Image: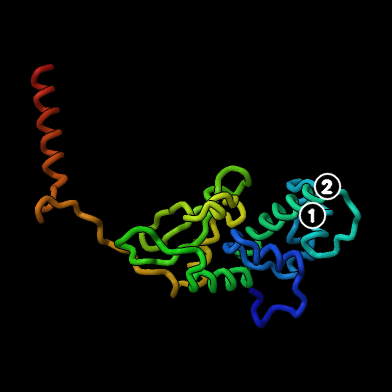
Amino acid sequence: FASDTDSDYTSYWRDWFISSRGNEYFCEIDEDYLTDRFNLTGLNTEVQYYQYALDLVTDVFDMDVDDDMRVQIEKSARHLYGLVHARYVVTTRGLAKMMEKYKQGVFGKCPRVICESQHLLPVGQHDIPNVSTVKLYCAKCEDIYNPKSTRHNSIDGAYFGTSFHSILFQVYPALMPQKTQRRYEPRIYGFRVHASAALMRWQEERREEMKERL
């Protein structure tokens, strides 16, 4: 998961987290980004056991705690990683890593037939955690979809944020697919079903109602 430009040092916790089933959408956050306190501004009020969680994520946690406490710290570490991840993916390094995942189709393909298997990007509907789960955005039809896997369906959308997908296409405009103008047209024995016919019937009914009222 680490690129050739990454440092030789790879955190054990991050390596475990990234390689865990269901975490394929996440990219690995660089060590120097995680250890720069400026990048973590305000997160100490968002995460329970913040310092313990940060120590675990950066692989310097060395306290002897009971199992229940360890579980709580582990949960906080995953939440902290997700919140930092939302900030990291809009940096130059983060965008580059997510761009590679996008090109490889890691996030899946659009289920809409007319989009012809266009690759998707993760998107949050809210930037505040615990509001909605992650969705997948198709740049071709400009719509969002639920992930196929239940494991991905449970990921918080705030771990990717509402702006990431738009910023990625601004930085890499060549990746933006051409918008599809085609729409599915329902037919009966080969003949198109005209929406105008339904509209005319509705207008005729309203006209008759007006006559009766007058």
Quarter holding residue 213 = top left
Residue 42 makes an appearance in the image = no
Q: Nearer the viewer, residue 100 or 139?
A: 100
The residue labelled by disc 2 is 69
Q: Nearer the viewer, residue 46 or 119?
A: 119
Q: CA distance from mark 1 to mark 2?
A: 11 Å
Residue at image coords 49%, 73%: 104
Q: How crowded is the residue under tag 1: few (<14 C-alpha within 10 Å), some, or many (20+)?
A: many
Q: Which mark is residue 53?
A: 1
The answer to whether one can see residue 48 in this image is yes
* Nearest the eye: 158 or 69: 69
- The N terminus is located in which quarter? bottom right
Which is more foreground, mark 1 or mark 2? Answer: 2
Residue at image coords 55%, 48% = 133
- Give the side of residue 139 with respect to residue 204, left or right: right
Q: How is the image coloured?
A: rainbow
Local crowd at mark 2 within 10 Å, few (<14), some, or many (≥20)? few
Q: Amino acid at mark 2?
A: Met
Q: Secondary structure at mark 1?
A: helix
Q: Is residue 196 left or right of residue 131?
A: left
Amino acid at circle 1: Ala
Residue 12 position within the rendered picture, expressed as x and y whole percent measured from the top left: 76, 68
Residue 55 drawn above or below residue 10: above
User: Residue 141 or 14: which is nearer the viewer?
Assistant: 14
Q: Secondary structure at mark 2?
A: helix
Picture quadrant where residue 19 is located: bottom right
Q: Earlier in the sequence, mark 1 or mark 2?
A: 1
- In the rendered image, residue 160, in percent from the top left (x then y), is placed at 58, 57
